[in-house]
Image (cartoon, rainbow, N blue to C red):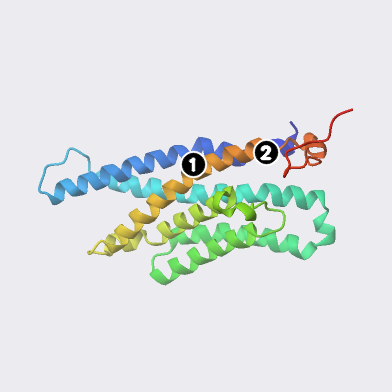
Amino acid sequence: MNPQDYFALLHPIIAVSLVFPLIGIVVNRALLTRERRLQLKANQKSKIPPVVGSEHVNLGKWLSSSVVGVALLGMAYPIISKMLAHEALTKEPFRVVFVAAIFVLTIVSLTMLYQARTKIWRGIFASLTGMGLIILGFQPEVFRRDNEWFFSHYYYGIAAAFLMIFSLAIVQDIYQDRQNRWRTVHIILNCFALLLFLGQGMTGTRDLLEIPLSWQEPYIYQCDFANQTCPQLK
């Protein structure tokens, strides 16, 4: 393996070692928080410590930033490696600078989303973060599996990242809404996000099997993927 191959593995390594463990912890804290809330609502004494609520919020924020970060990293590898291979800086200097600026602005927007307090600014920075992901994802270097979007690692990841961004944007609204409408929305959307994460595990494993090491690419890409045949070695 050369440095390019190690760079390609950063995305799955961080996803497996950081994002997926965080998902389990956040789900656990969410269930405990809900159980405690229901016990108190029924005038029962709960043995669940009050701190689980704040832990759920704080860990949820870590999860959201991790999901967006790993999505950016997953798109950075194909964009950078293919741009270098095709000498895009010489052929398309404006697009290279534009893409680099979008990466920076997306990270800045996500950071500002954590700092924003008013609803309008939370909406603005959430929208800018999401727009950054979309613009980067539709660069020609990114493999999206458009013909199989319903089982695409890219589309599952972008959808999950959008749900995480939305969750960050409505955190304050959840606590201010006495009718619990935002909490209900949060629960429904994040149950869907959990399904997307499961899909990410399956599609990510599949894609790792399909991506060859850099020194294997010249031979592998001669294969006929539709008929599942490769040229015979002489």
Does 207 sit above or below residue 91?
above
Task: Give the residue number, with chain letter if any, for mark 1.
Answer: 19
Task: Give the residue number, with chain letter if any, for mark 2.
Answer: 210
Quarter where residue 166 is shown = bottom left
Badge 1 amino acid: Val
Does 109 sit above or below residue 221?
below
Quarter where residue 9 is shown = top right
Local packing at callout 2 (Cα closer than 10 Å; few below 14, some 14-19, many 20+) is few
How far is disc 1 from disc 2 in space, using C-alphas?
22 Å
- Image quarter (top left, top right, bottom left or bottom right) of the N terminus: top right
Quarter where residue 96 is shown = bottom right
Q: Residue furthest top?
A: 234
Residue 184 at x, y percent in the picture: 30, 58
Q: Residue furthest bottom?
A: 120
**For residue 181, side relative to residue 39 (left or right):** right
Q: Which mark is residue 140?
A: none
Which type of secondary structure does the marked residue at label 2 adopt?
helix
Residue 196 at x, y percent in the picture: 47, 48
